[in-house]
Each structure stands twice: as C-alpha cells, then as structure tokens.
Image (cartoon, rainbow, N blue to C red):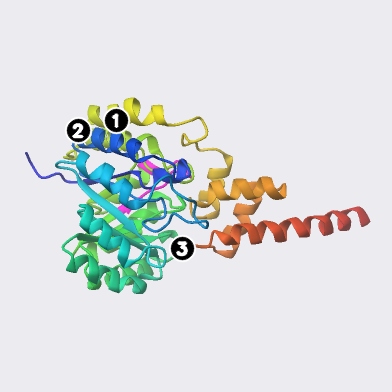
Amino acid sequence: MTDPDVRLVDMTLRDGMHAVDHQFTPEQMADVASALDDAEMDVVEMSHGDGMGGSSINYGFAAADTGEYLDAVVPELTDTKLSVLLLPGIGTVEELDLAVDRGADMCRIATHVTEADVSAEHFEFVNERGLEANGLLMLSHMASPETVLEQAKLMEEYGAEAVYVMDSAGAMLPEDVRERVGLLADELSVDVGFHAHNNLGLGIANTLAGIEAGATTVDGCLRGLGAGSGNAQMEVLVGVLEKAGYDVEPDFFGVMDAAEDVLVPMLTEDTMPELDNDSLVLGYAGVYSSFLRHTRRVGERFDLDPREILVELGDIGVVGGQEDMITDVAARMADDEPAAAESESDD
C-alpha cells in the first residue's frame, strides 16, 4: 500500500450535524462511522456542529452529549482515525480531556481567520496529551492571503501539524482558493488543508483548486451533508480524485455505499443538502454557512425574506459565534419596514 497523496477527512458526523439540527443519535453515528471505517476513510470527525461544547441554546441542543457520541463511535473505528472539533470560547479543556480519555486521535482547533492567537493554550494542551493537532482558519475569504498566512504561522508556532484554509461561507472562487492555499503551502513547514462549502456550487472545484495549489488534506461529507448547501460531497470527491490520478486511501464504492445505504435512510427531505436561493445568497454575501437554518426560522418569525437578512448580515461582516445577531438584525429590519412603506405612500 502506498501513502496517499491526499488525506480525506469525512465530517458527516460533525458539519453534517448542522443539516439535521444536531439530532443524529449515538446509534446513527455508530452506523455511519462503521460504514466509513469499512470504506477505509482516513479520518472521521465527530462532534456537535459547532464543536465540543456547542450543545446549547445559542447553537442548538444535540440529541446526546459528547461522551455518549464518543462511546458510540470509537468502537466502530479500526484503522480510521477519529477527530474532534473545538472552537475556543465554545469548547473547553474539560471537553478536550473527555475526548482524549474516550479515544480521539486528533483535535482540530478552529478560530476566526484573524483570531488565531486565542488558540495557543488549546494547541499546547492537545500536544501535551499526544493528539495530532490541526488548526482551522474559518471564514478565510474575509482576510487577504497575507493575513491568512500571518495567522497560519501563529498556529504553526503553537504546534499545529496542519493548518486549514476554511471557506466557511462557500464564498470563494477557485482563484481565491489558489492564492491562499498556495501561499501557505509555499511558506509553512507543516501540511496545508482546505475545507469547502458548496453555496456557490464550487465545493468540488474549489477543493481541486486547493489540492493543485498544495493542500494535502481536505474535507468532505457523505452526500455533501453540511451547513448551508453542504460541503464538498465525499463520494464525488473520492471518484474525482481517482480520475485525476491522485492516490487516495478510501474505497470509491465503499464510500458510495456508506452514503446511499447508511446515511440517506436517516435523512428527510428538508435535511438533504440543496443549492437553493437562500444558500446561494450565503455564498454571495459571504455569511457563515451554519447561519442558514437559523436565518430561515427568524425570517419566518418576522415575516422577512431570509435572503434580505443574509445580505444585511454580510454587509455588517458577521462571523461565526454571532448567531444572536440574526435576530437583532431581523428585528431592526422589521421595524424599518413600516417606516419605509409609509415613506413610499407619501411619495
């Protein structure tokens, strides 16, 4: 067996949690993990959609706690590594301790693209506990390539073994990906990763652009499940990479079977990823993909078009962790509408 050119991280049990309002049961997670292990997936990531500690009124309560999910998933993985996600300010060292004690192999630490400095102590702890530590720079479209590099170097200094450019809003074009990933690949001494969302329909194309620019580890989800219109679709990604001549570890048919036979029966019509008008606006406006379902609910509450709310959120530059702003912005827009209507009638 040769070493794969590209390492694949399947996030169905983490980013895919957004699509199901974090309601995968431990049993469902175990079934998906088992199928991915059978398909020889490199890494499976598991946690609340917003990382360990994310189960809350702000981000949505999960169907079970982190310990229950870990106890269900870990026994199903043999050669496949298990990753957990932590966002400083949401997750804590206590959750990291739990993940280590229950059998996680990796921890991916995610910050906003300009806030890598908040992750120093988390990298220190993960490294002390012997886990592989990766750094994720969320909403990388909101910073110049030079700023992304500056922040990536901080994570490298803190002990990251790989640093990811994350297109958390699905807002990047292939050239945006090449500029950021290529600069990191040239300047860092650690691996570079890329994480795509499909809000502009570019999830696979942008992932290929990232790999061509030097990314050696990339993310995807079965059936493209994920926040917004979803992530790069894992079974498509495996097939495309094989056709492009890359040496990848997961079995193409096995990943297809995991999606079709195991995941799909768990999903309902409203949880299947879809590139519809609202999610398209996410990418157009550059808004964090996990805001979509929250925005739809708030739009219904205030009788507003979710697209108008998303554009306004993009204009004010909201970032991950500011979900409370959705209601504030919608309430202000709803208050402004009668005044605008009155002004039009006066004309």
Residue at figure coordinates x 57%, y 61% from the top left? 324
Rendering coords of residue 33 (x, y %): 27, 38
Do we see residue 307 in this rendering? no
Answer yes or no: do the residues labelled 2 and 1 have beta carbons within 8 Å?
yes
Residue wearing tag 1: 258
Q: Are marks 2 and 3 in contact (CB under 8 Å)?
A: no
Query: Which is nearer the eye, 304 or 236?
Result: 304
User: Going by the image, does 144 lie left or right of 329?
Assistant: left
Q: Quadrant of residue 144?
A: bottom left
Label 2 to label 3: alpha-carbon separation: 38 Å
Question: Which is in the foreground here, disc 2 or disc 3?
Answer: 2
Looking at the image, which residue sits at the far left? Answer: 1
Q: For residue 302, which numbered disc appears in the image?
A: none
**Within 10 angstroms of label 1, few (less than 14), some, or many (20 or more) residues?**
many
How much space separates mark 2 and mark 1, taking CA atoms? 9 Å
Residue at image mark 3:
142
- Looking at marks 2 and 3 on the same chain, the residue that comes earlier in the sequence is marked by 2
Q: Tell me where residue 334 appears, x and y as whole percent.
A: 74, 55
Determine the residue positioned at 42% across, 56% down.
54
Whether residue 73 sits left or right of residue 273 in the image: it is left
Depth order, front residue of 60/321: 60
Looking at the image, is mark 1 or mark 3 nearer the viewer? Answer: 1
Number of the label disc, if any, that sits on residue 38? 2
**Which residues fall within the magenta stretch?**
194-204
Split into 4 quadrants, where in the image is the C terminus? bottom right
Label 1 is placed on what type of residue?
A: Ala
Q: Look at label 3 and name its amino acid.
A: Met
Q: Is residue 285 magenta?
A: no
